[in-house]
Image (cartoon, grey):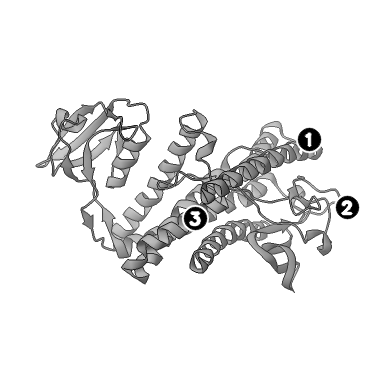
Amino acid sequence: MVVTIILFFLIFGILVISHEFGHFIIGKKCGIRVNEFAVGMGPVLFHFQKGETKYTLRLLPFGGACMFDGEDGSGDDDEDLDKKGDSVKDGDLSDKANLVKEFDDGYGQSAGDGTETLSCGGSSDAFDEHSFPNVNVWKRIATVVAGPAANYIVALICSFIVVAFSGTDLPNVAKVMPDSAAAEAGLQAGDTIKKINNEHIHMYREVSLDSAMNTQGDPMNIVYERDGKEYKALLTPKYSDEDSRYYIGLVGGGDYMKCNVLQVFEYGFYEVHYWTKYTFKSLKMLVTGKVGVNALSGPVGIAQFVGDTYEEVKPYGLSSVILTMMDILILLSVNLGIMNLLPLPALDGGRLLFMIIEVIRGKKVSPEKEGIVHLAGFIALMVLMVFVMYQDIMRLIK
C-alpha cells in the first residue's frame, strides 16, 4: 500500500509539474509575469522568492499551478493564492482498467473552499505589458499550448527509455485461431500485419487495439506480408457470447526486437503515436455512447491501477517495475496532453478557443463572459469528478 501511494504521487507529480513548467518557461520567454509557481495545493509548507516569482511547496500533493499576473483579477496578493492549484477532473481510459483520465489546468481564483473558479483577464488601472491579458495573443496561445506540449515531451522521453531497454513488439502473427475470421481469410502464423483499414501498423499492440475497439464487428481491411509479398484480406470479426465482444482470431505480440539507436527514436515515436491513437479512439467510443460514463475513473481508480500493476510486475525485479511505471506515465502524459487541448471550458483547449476567436474577430471576448463560460465548465467538470470518484470508491469496496 505504501509503495502504491508513493508511486501514484510520483507519477502524478511528474505529470502536473511538467505540465505547469511548460506554461511557466514559455510564459517567461514571452515576457509574462509569473506571480507564483506552486507544487501541491492548500496551505504553504515552504516558499522562497526569486525575482518576481514566488515558488511554493504546498501541503496537499495534488496538482500544482503556474499563476500568471492578471489572470485572477489581482496582482501579487500572496494570501489569495493559498487555495489555488490544479485539480484532477476525471479519469483516464487505460487498456487494462478502461480509465479515461482528465486533469484540469487550474487558472483562476479561489472560491474559498479549496476549489477554483476561473476568470480570464484581470483588471488594472494602469496598462501592464507583462500582465497575461495584455500580452500579444500569439504569445498567450504559445504559453497555453506549452503545458500539453510539455506532457508530450515527457511521454517521448519515457518512450525512448522504455524502447531502449525493452525493445518493441513486432506485428507478427504467432497463431491463427481455428474457425476465426482470420483463418477464413487465409492468414497464417508468421504473417506480418502491415496495415489495418489503411493505417500503418508498427507494433502488435496496434492490432490488438484495433480489434478491441471494434465493438460493432465492422469489417476490417488487412494488409499483411508473407515471404516478402503483400496480400490483402477483408476480416469480418466474429462475436463471442462468452466474452461479449468481437474477435478476429489473431494471436501475436510474442516477437520482440531489440532496437539500435536510430530504432529507439523511431519506435519511441511509434509508442507515443500508439497511445495518442488509443486516447482518441477511447474518446470516440465515449462520445458515441459505445462506452458509458461508468467506464470513467479518477484518481482513486488510477491509484488502484498503479497498485495492481505494481503487484503484477514486482516479482520480475526493480527494472521491470521502473519500465512498467514509465509505460503508465507515457499513457497518462499523452492523455493529459490531449484532454487539456479539448475545446472545453476551464481546460487549456477552452482558453485556446477564446484566443482563436479573438484572432478571427480582431478583438477579445469580454473577460466577464469568458469567465462565466469557464466557471460553468469548471462546475460541470467538478460534478463529473465527484461522480467518477464515487464510482471508483464503490468499485474498490465491492
Disc nearest the viewer among 2 and 3: 3
Query: Circle 2: is it few (<14), some (14-19), or many (20+) Cα within 10 Å?
Result: few
Q: CA distance from mark 2 to mark 3?
A: 51 Å
Residue, x 13% and y 42% (percent of image)?
189
Question: Residue reaching furthest left?
Answer: 227
Residue located beneath label 1 in the image: 369
| Mark nearer the N terminus (2 vs 3) | 2
The label nearer to you, 1 versus 2, is 1
Q: Is residue 147 above or below residue 43?
A: above
Are the residues flagged by discs 1 and 2 in contact, CB closer than 8 Å? no
Is residue 250 rendered to the left or right of residue 277? left
Q: Which residue is mark 3?
A: 304
Looking at marks 1 and 3 on the same chain, the residue that comes earlier in the sequence is marked by: 3
Q: Earlier in the sequence, mark 1 or mark 2?
A: 2
Residue at position x 30%, y 41% from top?
208
CA distance separating discs 1 and 3: 40 Å
Distance CA(mark 1)–CA(mark 2): 22 Å
